[in-house]
Amino acid sequence: MTAERPESFAGVGDAFERLWTPHRMVYIDGENKPADASAGQCPFCRAPGRSDAEGLVVGRGEVAYAVLNLYPYNPGHLLVCPYRHVSDFTELTDAESAEVTALVQRAMRVIRAVSHPAGFNLGINQGEVAGAGIQAHLHAHVVPRWQGDANFLPVVGRTKALPQLLDDTRTLLAKAWAADVAG
Ligand SMILES: [Zn+2]
């Protein structure tokens, strides 16, 4: 693990550029990397088989679900994944495409209700070169953003998330998810 000093990031482009800098996303996205690309090794295939609390699942749809990122860029950083072990966006069925979109929209409403971010970054990294840490299983990032968050993001990014904090966050979001009537 490279110990990156927060001050070394000062003045490196704007926050958006920084967020989607591939090596940063690999860093954020790529821990706990599976040994191979098979479904058996895949954290996004395993998570739905666990309880919501154990799997950090926030909400479940018919063909896709929303889960907390174990290594969040910001608090509330969610991932929306199809249940099916599929890597490429073009491989999604119509039903999966529709539900991934609907769950991203729902995630935005839920995060807004819980923590009132000033904005979001939404994105899907395709391929290792593009920053996908677990490229075998497609996942759409929903990253809440606040004014000035870039100032502490490098610190957040390299700090191991504490399970208790993730559990608190998941509980908050799951409650708001259930209450989201528009979804
Ligand atoms: Zn998978």
Image (spheres, rainbow, N blue to C red):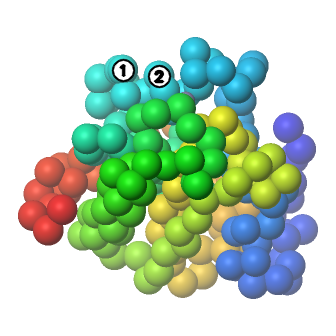
Total marks drawn?
2
Residue on which disc 1 sits:
49
Question: Which residue lies at the image location 25% right of the left edge and 41% below the top edge?
Answer: 62
Q: Residue at x 14, y 68 (%)?
A: 182
* Residue at horizontal 35 percent and vertical 20 percent from the top: 50
Q: Amino acid at mark 2?
A: Arg
Q: Can you say whether 162 is above or below 150 in the image?
A: above
Q: Along the line of sight, which residue is nearer the eye, 141 or 8?
A: 141
Q: Amino acid at mark 1?
A: Gly
- Residue 75 is situated, as x and y percent measured from the top left of the image, at 47, 57
Q: Which residue is mark 2?
A: 46
Q: Are marks 1 and 2 in contact (CB under 8 Å)?
A: yes
Between the residue at mark 1 and the residue at mark 2, the CA separation in whole angstroms equals 5 Å
Q: Is residue 152 above or below residue 88?
A: below
Within 10 Å of disc 1 (Cα), the crowding (few <14, some 14-19, many 20+) is few
Residue 24 falls left or right of residue 2: left
Q: Is residue 107 visible?
A: no
Secondary element at tag 1: helix
Q: Is mark 2 within 8 Å of ligand 1?
A: yes
